[in-house]
Amino acid sequence: MDIRTAPAAAAHAETRRGDYRPPDWLVPEVALDFTLDPDRSTVRARLIVERNGAHDRPLRLEGDGIAATWLKVDGAPVEPVMDGPTLVIALSGDRATIETEVALHPAANSKLMGLYASGGILCTQCESQGFRRISFHPDRPDVLSVYTVRMSADKARFPVLLANGNCTASGDGQDGNGKEGRHWAEWNDPFPKPSYLFALVAGDLAPNRDSFTTMSGRNVDLGIWVREADLAKTAHAMAALKSSMAWDERTYGREYDLDLFNIVAVDDFNFGAMENKGLNIFNSRYILADADTATDGDFDAIAGVVAHEYFHNWSGDRVTCRDWFQLSLKEGFTVFRDQGFSADIGSAAVKRIDDVRVLRSAQFPEDAGPLAHPVRPESYLEITNFYTATVYNKGAEVIGMMRTILGPDRFRAGSDLYFDRHDGEAVTCEDFVKAMEDASGINLAQFRLWYSQAGTPTVTARLDQDGGRTVLHLSQSVPATPGQSTKQPMVIPLRTALIGRDSGAELAPAQVILLTEAEQAIAFDGITEPAMLSINRDFSAPIILDVTRAAGELESLAEHDPNPFARYEALQELMLRTLIAGANGEPVDPAPVIEAMRRTLASNALDPAFKGEALLLPSESMIGDRMPLVDPDAIHDAREALRRAIGVALADPLAAAQREGAPGSDLSPAAKSIRRLRSVALGLIAAGDTLRGAALAKAQFDSADNMTDRQGALGILVSLDAPERQAALDGFYDRYQADSLVIDKWFGLQAAAQRRDTLAAVEALARHPDFSMTNPNRSRALVGSLAMNQWAFHTASGEGYRFLADMILASDRINPQTAARLVPPLGRWRRFEPGRAALMRAQLERIVAEPNLSKDVFEQVSKSLA
Ligand code: B3K
Ligand code: ZN
């Protein structure tokens, strides 16, 4: 139940970065008093406000779907004056006490922003602008306050009451009056924070308790709060929390600052998790895991997200963002930090391959489409739409490039300076870069273009060797993107080595070449043998690389390049060239790919996890991204043909790899590697021989003692026409009916199936009793997975587009954030052949014509059509 305020003229108004002005009023103190009930909660707020600078503007407190039951200024009742959703209070003095009361209906809050109910737990989500759905407030990240929170609730239904900071008092009754069945608690957070970091939780929860001793010897009590029945699934998250606390001390010198650190898991959550100060709230999929229900990938994602949210305590909470255009200040940096953590606790090469895969599959298409925006955007209608792969993942690459340019020691000096200089402040991306410059003495003026220019640069590279001279010719270009027709050359750090074509040895030590001009030539001295270029090693820059290669070079690099990432890239590039030729209808010889894969499989020097990654063919959408126009059928056919050829030719070594297993209880990198390669091999075997593949998959499924093997097998069976398929799907459902995170997998695997009837199956599953649009995990599992399944989603009839548009419209009425996230797959219409493009566009037009569309969906759809 949202109270509709007068349709503000500003409903679709843009917020622009250049319009930033410091707040007119500061709020040094906030005291909140919640009387909690799912059907009717009341929130009393007392704000101490102070005029900021000399001006005579009124105090403006933002609201969203709330109304003040009363308002007091310095203790005296005042009639509330509204400007649309905003409460406007004229104040004559420079300091005042403002009190408001609002009533909320958490159980009816399906947007999952503000105070809402999830499975009987009351919880909050405030970033970016959810606090204004709880109480009237400036609700901008540069207004920092010390919060005191009091809450009362029914003791039987909500025995646990948590908020930010430390619990200072608690007792039975309400307001000290002993009201029957209720209890209360009071919390205080000594660290001033913006409203987006406020949180409270009330529920019937049990803790996994542990403790951590910080580097200065302080004890921190840790708690992970879940339903009692889920306690056994919290061990991995707790271990990850403790190792990320130690890692941040070692790697960035950052120590935790409160005596308490709590995490709560809830089932209904709009994204992964939230870094509220001292009280992180998580989507339960990033906390709960055991070998029977979670894959190795799930375990890794849990460690990564737990670390990410923990790291925000410094990169986000202690030093926060001045305005939402600076989102990458905390998100890009924190992703970079969590990637470093995961690389250190697992295989660094595999982690880099995974991160680059995410960048290429999510960020590159975004950068090449109608929703392209710089890492630091210039304007938005709805900030929620800017929690993107560009802000997060390209933002992390930008930090990584600074580290590459500065070197690790100067980078660390820069981050120390940044944290020291800005502790307790709300700052900008510019402040971060300035700290890096000041600490290193390196000028980053041109580098700053990475924050302002959208679009993925393309770099061409050619190594010329003649007359004893070796010269590397480089050129760069950045494509036009919406609102940015011309671009300047960027600073592109390219980690480069030359490899002897005959010896396979590095002829010159690897070095970082800084490409700063549109065209540049670099001469190498003392190279006497024919050389091959190994460039953009470890993906040192987030670019598209176009290297002129001699015949046989990629094969040779795939086998000999000493840099594992470069070997992976060479094999991927070899596959891509073959697949693109196939999709273009050219005659294709699969032999070079098969032989390179055979050598990779046979190598004893390679980690099996690396082999698993290396043998995975580029996805259909990645192939499409490299073509002028996407023809999903041609791409699918070419990819399946190559998979079949590989499966037939390498049947024996693949079968050997598939036979290797590791006990599910073993989560060591080596055991994970074996399982990873096992299911990749199974997929290729099945591509070569359906009957054999189905039998092997069924056997792997039945004998599995862990979810990685079980899901790996089921993920292959779902695409096969074999009797084992339905039996396995049914068995899986029956076994895990009561476990919603596993049932998400069941929905997701069917939506990802490579079958002609996938779309029809998904439409049927959308009517399954377990399907629900109100749970973001479930809707993403079914609808999100279909939209990522290029061949199944893009059927020539356009039925997939109609289905997705229906889902967007239905979901917009429930949860606009979830709905808006489903728009980008339709927004890529210009990339598809004309028939499909027209059908996709027609669905976008149908959506935008709908009255009462949310700002979230309106922004994504209208920009996609522009
Ligand atoms: N900061 C949150 C994301 C909030 C998204 C708001 N629409 C989680 C994270 O990135 O850590
Ligand atoms: Zn984050």
Image (cartoon, helix red, strand yellow):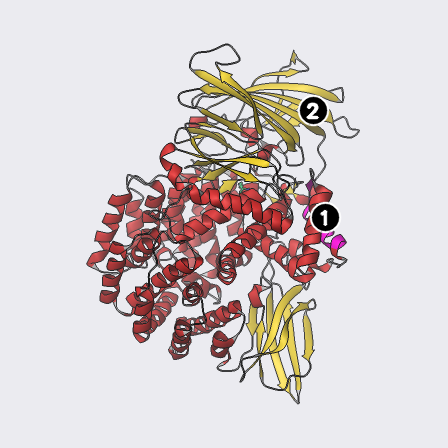
Does dot 1 land on a helix, a strand or a loop? helix
Is residue 688 something that shows in the picture?
A: yes
Provide the residue span drawn in magenta.
426-439
Q: Residues within 10 Å of mark 1 (few under 14, many from 20)?
A: some
What residue is disc 1 on? 417
Q: Is residue 820 visible?
A: no
Q: Tell which of 353 and 514 is nearer to you.
A: 353
Image quadrant assignment for residue 768: top left
Three-letter amino acid code at the position of disc 2: Val
Q: CA distance from mark 1 to mark 2?
A: 31 Å
Residue 85 pos. (x, y %) = 58, 27
> Depth check: 687 or 237 in front?
237
Residue at image point 54% right, 79% down: 549
Q: Position of residue 589 (x, y in %)?
A: 38, 79
Which one is closest to the eye, mark 1 or mark 2? 1
Q: Residue furthest front?
A: 217
